[in-house]
Image (cartoon, grey):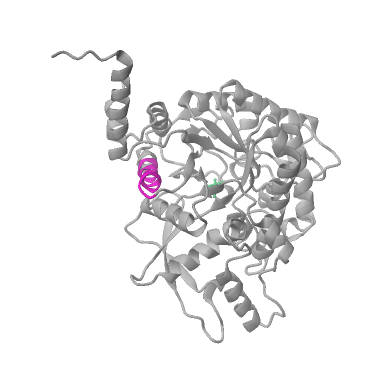
């Protein structure tokens, strides 16, 4: 007997076959899953003194290191020159085939005085041009309002330790929504308050370089959480209906593996002190800081003779307002570490305020950044932790990437491809097997750029930038072409398979 099938039936059958194969191999992305790439303003733009742009905190900080002498090697004065080369960058992003581009705005380019009484027409026009160019190439813009750079005048007033920053940020955010709201449907308010506040006000390796451990970072995060909430409220009340977009916050998170086998506590405590510090007030059922932080910092403060906890308190009104102010959980995840609990000492209290000490497993491969060990399984673990802790919120991976050394001739960046492969593989297990609600994956970073305290010594770009060449010539690395292949086939592809199909 002969059966005749029409063509569409066979196509559907083939699609189903391929789909079940990629499910079995754990290589497929859920339908509608989006893949993008990211950068930030100070790290890439350069053009530090064009038109009427104001001086920002990082201009002052990096110039201060050179005692007033210009030195391209350790400032973002030129950086990757993306302010001038944005069309070339967007062409590269489009050639690779990314769905979206996560970029940030320079506050001092938009409000040169820091305050809302003067808006720079040129600054605003620049970003309109960038956004229009993205739309023209069919790339969705994902805009971070604040990725660590703000007008220097605000630092002179205390920066993020000044509660008025909440008002200044609110004014800036409103202007940003007014100017760009029709062009942007996806917003992030603040990038990684935890890392920013610790590095700016505890270790002092970021602008403004203050060392106030145990005090500065807690005040900084407190104000950032309020500033984030105000921006979310403004978007909700004044713009959401017209612009119909989403807005959330970006949180940094390692996964913390307990060193001791039967220790279930230390991993959780370490999570609460890192990601939970920001996430608990926003995503948990009860809001406010994680109880373990309130308890332990309170106990330490008492032992140290402070009249109140060094961790500021939210009023009941703020606790309610902050809760729920994120349409997605933005997660920047790069690495993991090992943790161990140290019991409270009756005289000195909790070590590090948390009672946790951390280390790394010497067998883990390390990237160029000292903090970046390659531990893919931690990715699946932190996604599961977020799922359990906050009732499976929609998660956007807003950064994930691997650093190489500046002196390597590393266009053939196979280590980076292996990193991306193994991390994406774990993310897909978290999605397809564990049911984690992940919708987007963003590779960090499109370009080599100014790596904050590491200046140009570490390179995260999937595109190499020649910082010795005044043209800042761009050369896509092999990882760019591998990601292009993944995007094209919408499937995780091993290096070997990719390599075999290369011409
Ligand atoms: C930051 C980026 C930075 C990356 C690598 C992230 O924490 O958001 O700005 O380049 O880490 O250091």
In the picture as drawn, the residue positioned furthest to the right comes out as 117
Where residue 349 sits, quadrant-wise, is bottom right
Q: Is residue 404 depicted above or below 251 in this figure?
A: above
List the single residue furthest toward the bottom.
346
The answer to if 430 sits in the magenta stretch is: yes
The stretch in magenta equals: 420-434
- Quadrant the C terminus occupies: top left
Is residue 55 at all visible to an observer of this figure? Answer: no
- Pinpoint residue 197: horizontal percent, then vertical percent: 63, 58
Q: Nearer the viewer, residue 448 or 22?
A: 22
Position of 494 with respect to 483 (left or right) is left
Q: Quadrant of residue 413?
A: top left
Measured from the top left, where is residue 90 in percent x and y? 56, 26
Number of on-image labels:
0
Q: Position of residue 158 (x, y in %)?
A: 76, 58
Residue at x 51%, y 32% (from the top left corner): 466
Q: Residue at x 54, y 23 (%)?
A: 91
């Amino acid at each position: 007997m002969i059966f005749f099938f029409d063509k569409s039936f066979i196509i559907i059958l083939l699609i189903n076959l391929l789909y079940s194969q990629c499910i079995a191999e754990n290589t497929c992305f859920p339908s509608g899953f989006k893949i993008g790439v990211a950068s930030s303003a100070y790290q890439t733009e350069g053009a530090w003194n064009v038109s009427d742009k104001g001086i920002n905190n990082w201009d002052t900080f990096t110039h201060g290191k050179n005692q007033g002498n210009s030195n391209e090697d350790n400032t973002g004065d030129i950086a990757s020159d993306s302010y001038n080369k944005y069309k070339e960058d967007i062409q590269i992003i489009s050639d690779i085939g990314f769905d979206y581009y996560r970029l940030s705005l320079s506050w001092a380019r938009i409000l040169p005085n820091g305050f809302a009484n003067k808006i720079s027409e040129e600054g605003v026009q620049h970003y309109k041009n960038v956004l229009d160019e993205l739309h023209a190439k069919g790339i969705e813009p994902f805009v971070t309002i604040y990725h660590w750079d703000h007008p220097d005048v605000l630092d002179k007033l205390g920066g993020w330790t000044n509660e008025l920053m909440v008002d200044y940020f609110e004014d800036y955010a409103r202007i940003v929504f007014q100017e760009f709201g029709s062009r942007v449907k996806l917003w992030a308010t603040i990038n990684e308050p935890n890392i920013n506040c610790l590095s700016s006000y505890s270790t002092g390796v970021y602008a403004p370089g203050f060392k106030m451990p145990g005090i500065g970072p807690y005040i900084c995060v407190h104000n950032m959480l309020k500033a984030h909430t105000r921006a979310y409220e403004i978007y909700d009340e004044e713009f959401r209906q017209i612009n119909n977009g989403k807005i959330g916050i970006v949180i940094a998170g390692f996964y913390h593996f307990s060193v001791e086998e039967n220790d279930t506590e230390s991993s959780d405590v370490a999570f609460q002190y890192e990601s939970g510090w920001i996430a608990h007030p926003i995503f948990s059922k009860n809001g406010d800081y994680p109880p373990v932080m309130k308890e332990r910092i309170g106990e330490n403060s008492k032992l140290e003779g402070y009249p109140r906890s060094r961790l500021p308190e939210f009023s009941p009104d703020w606790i309610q307002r902050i809760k729920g102010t994120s349409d997605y959980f933005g997660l920047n995840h790069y690495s993991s570490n090992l943790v161990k609990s140290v019991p409270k000492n009756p005289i000195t209290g909790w070590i590090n305020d948390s009672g946790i000490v951390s280390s790394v497993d010497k067998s883990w491969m390390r990237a160029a950044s000292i903090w970046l060990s390659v531990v893919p399984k931690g990715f699946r673990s932190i996604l599961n932790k977020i799922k359990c802790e906050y009732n499976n919120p929609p998660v956007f991976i807003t950064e994930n990437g691997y650093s190489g050394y500046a002196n390597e001739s590393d266009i053939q960046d196979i280590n980076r491809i292996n990193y991306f492969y193994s991390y994406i593989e774990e993310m897909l297990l978290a999605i397809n097997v564990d049911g984690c609600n992940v919708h987007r994956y963003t590779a960090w970073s499109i370009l080599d750029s100014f790596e904050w305290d590491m200046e140009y010594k570490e390179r995260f770009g999937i595109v190499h930038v020649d910082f010795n060449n005044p043209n800042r010539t761009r050369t896509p690395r092999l990882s760019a072409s591998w990601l292009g292949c993944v995007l094209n086939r919408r499937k995780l592809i091993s290096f070997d398979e990719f390599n075999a199909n290369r011409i």
